[in-house]
Amino acid sequence: MNQIAFTIGSKPIHWYGVCIALGFLIATGLMLWKRDYAKMTKDQIIDVAMLSIFTGILGARIFYVVQFWDKNFAGHPFWKVFRIDEGGLVFYGGFICAFTTMCVYGKLKKISPLLILDMTGLGVVCGHAFGRIGCFMQGCCFGKVAAKGFPGAVVYPAGSAPAGRYPDLLNNMNSLPLYPVQIYEFVLNILLCAGLILFMNKNDKPGRVSALYIAIYAVIRFILEFFRGDHKDSFLGMTPSQNVALFLMLPLGILLFFFFTHFCKKNGNVSKE
């Protein structure tokens, strides 16, 4: 773990911010590469990319601040709310905000919102993957204590959030060996991104790419939450993210995929038949 990538003068630049920026650039390049799928111009892709990153970060930060207000923000200077370079984003908050914005943008620009959602889904899964590398370097979204002898377990240094939650009292207060769950999510998101590209190359019903993304990521997130150790709050014996994945995102993705398959034309309009 090394939170600081480099410094500009006396200003430290965190790896978290660097990875978010890198993910944005790669995701934008990916959408530009596949823009013919949605018959969008380069300027429209740039618009979508900029709107997605800003509204996504805004929504993700709002959800994080609300969820962890008492723990991380109450009693601290208000400007701490804006320090996203130090970590602290809730993916589902960003997802909801960004996808809603894309629907509005499509209506305003008279572009099929379904095509925009497909492009956005492809960009989001790519950017999200690199964001998880930032989480790993920052020491947030960390895993639970790994099984004894588990290969690939990671140890975080004393003073870090993982070490505070799972201190190794016999090893200078470093953390106990933890599952590198952020790396798991990075790999799975990259594989999902590749799968969506292959599906997009053959897909003739707009909307199904984003629906597939929603459903598959819900399964990924539900499973990975069993290995997460950065929060203890639960509902119905599951984490908040597992509840969202199981009861909202997974059924939503399946229903949308079915709907787009049977009731949408190739141009993204709903069939009147």
Image (cartoon, grey):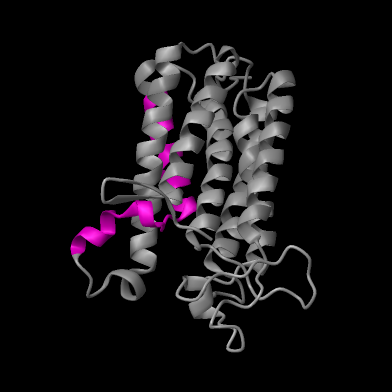
Residue 237, position as x, y percentages in the image: 62, 77
Most extreme residue toward the front is 9
Q: Was residue 129 drawn as part of the magenta stretch in this picture?
A: no
Corner quadrant of residue 273 = top right
Corner quadrant of residue 238 = bottom right
Q: Specify whether 227 is left or right of 64.
A: right
> Does the rendering let one see residue 232?
no
Q: Residue at left 45%, top 20%? A: 45
Q: Residue at left 53%, top 82%? A: 173
Between 93 and 5, the residue placed more toward the observer is 5
Q: Specify whether 21 is left or right of 235.
A: left
Between 126 and 266, the residue placed more toward the observer is 126
Residue 195, position as x, y percentages in the image: 73, 33
What are the residue bounds of the magenta stretch?
A: 78-106
Between 54 and 170, the residue placed more toward the observer is 170
Residue 18, position as x, y percentages in the image: 44, 43
Q: Specify whether 47 is left or right of 174.
A: left
Q: Was residue 94 drawn as part of the magenta stretch in this picture?
A: yes
Q: Residue at left 46%, top 11%? A: 41
Q: Is residue 174 above or below residue 152?
A: below
- Label total for image: 0
Residue 32, position as x, y percentages in the image: 52, 18
Q: Is residue 46 above or below residue 26?
A: above
